[in-house]
Image (tube, rainbow, N blue to C red):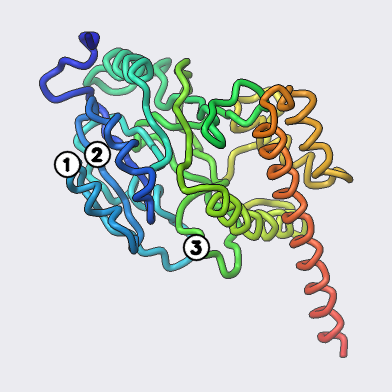
Amino acid sequence: MRSSAFTAENGISVTVLLAARNEAANLSRCLAALRPAAEIVVVDSGSVDNTPEIARDAGARVLQFEHTGGYPKKRQWALEMVRFKTAWVLLLDADEVVPEALWAEIATAVAADGPDAVGATKPVAYLIKKGFHFLGRRFRFGGFSFDAMLLVRPERVRFERLIEVPGDTLDMEVHERLIVDGPVGRLNTPLIHEDFKGLEAYIDKHNRYSTWEAHLRHQFLTSGEYGEESVQPRLFGNPQERRRWLKRLAIRTPGEPWLWFAYHYLFKLGFLEGTAGKIACQIRADYIRQVRAKMYELRLKDRHEAGERRH
């Protein structure tokens, strides 16, 4: 029997903002867990499968976004353009499922805020852990789960405006973090984060991500900054700030792919997940190898162009 958190006439006063593109393999499972939400808004990007139809059949409002390069990308565009019916928005991907225990926490968080203006000490955003599932199993070890700013008051947050990457074809924020104007809270129940499109799609996606990250790192090393607006790197800050601090350190660290493998497989006990754990750790290390190789290619290109200008 569901708790009283799920029995309000119009559901929990939260809008789910779901970014999607060609997510037919994942979307139905995600949407089935969103019944407590007051509204679901799916922002699509010209899917060629039946993603929009699945979303509409589930009662979601479907919007189309066309990325023309640069800022904003999909989620920031939606935060700026959509007229939300609720004060709180939950940012989701199509390969994520919200368990009932998390819905109960969300209900408590938004009810505590109430209809009044946000107080000086009340959170305007909440961190939620993305619980990592891989090759059909939930990982307890390996350190692949991470905290992300997902439950937000849209008028008090904005995505980083990072350095524009030439030829960027990613229309959705991947590495960009949320800059928050106000206190941050934390919810305890993790999301279920599990992609059912298979390893080929998973590796292909990370190949595209590595191209983007290589450009971003290269431009940081040559310009000294990530962009016009970015999360500040702080070792003892919130998880977003700490991750950014570690990224800045890792960029200049020799043997970075091996260090990431050791971190996930040994330090975070990824070997306890068996063969699936080893594969996940190898993919993580391979991703960093791709990033570093593409950074080297960019440096060669810079040298070649500098040589041509001298002649």
Write down the quadrant of residue 265 in the picture: top right
Q: Residue at x 65, y 51 (%)?
A: 226
At a point 16% along the width and 15% down the height, the residue shown is 7
Q: Earlier in the sequence, mark 2 or mark 1?
A: 2
Quarter of the image that includes the C terminus: bottom right
Q: Are marks 2 and 1 in contact (CB under 8 Å)?
A: yes
**Disc 3 to disc 2, C-alpha distance:** 26 Å
**Residue 207 in picture, x, y percent from top left:** 63, 57
Q: Secondary structure at mark 1?
A: loop
Q: Which residue is mark 1?
A: 59
State the SS at label 2. strand
The numbered mark, 3 or 1, whose residue comes first in the sequence reads 1
Q: Residue at x 65, y 34 (%)?
A: 276
Q: CA distance from mark 2 to mark 1?
A: 8 Å
Marks 3 and 1, how far apart in space?
31 Å
Rendered-image quadrant of the N terminus: top left
Q: Which mark is residue 40?
A: 2
How many residues crowd around disc 1 within 10 Å: few (fewer than 14), some, or many (20 or more)? some
Identify whether 49 is placed above or below 166. above
Image position, residue 89 (x, y; %): 32, 33
Amino acid type, callout 1: Gly
Q: Residues within 10 Å of mark 2 (few under 14, many from 20)?
A: many
Residue 135 location (% of width, % of height):
56, 37
Residue receiving disc 3: 70
Q: Secondary structure at mark 3?
A: loop
Q: Alpha-carbon neighbours of circle 3 within 10 Å: few (<14), some, or many (≥20)?
A: some
Question: Which amino acid type is shown beneath numbered disc 2?
Answer: Ile
Residue located 68% across and 32% down the image: 277
Q: How many marks?
A: 3
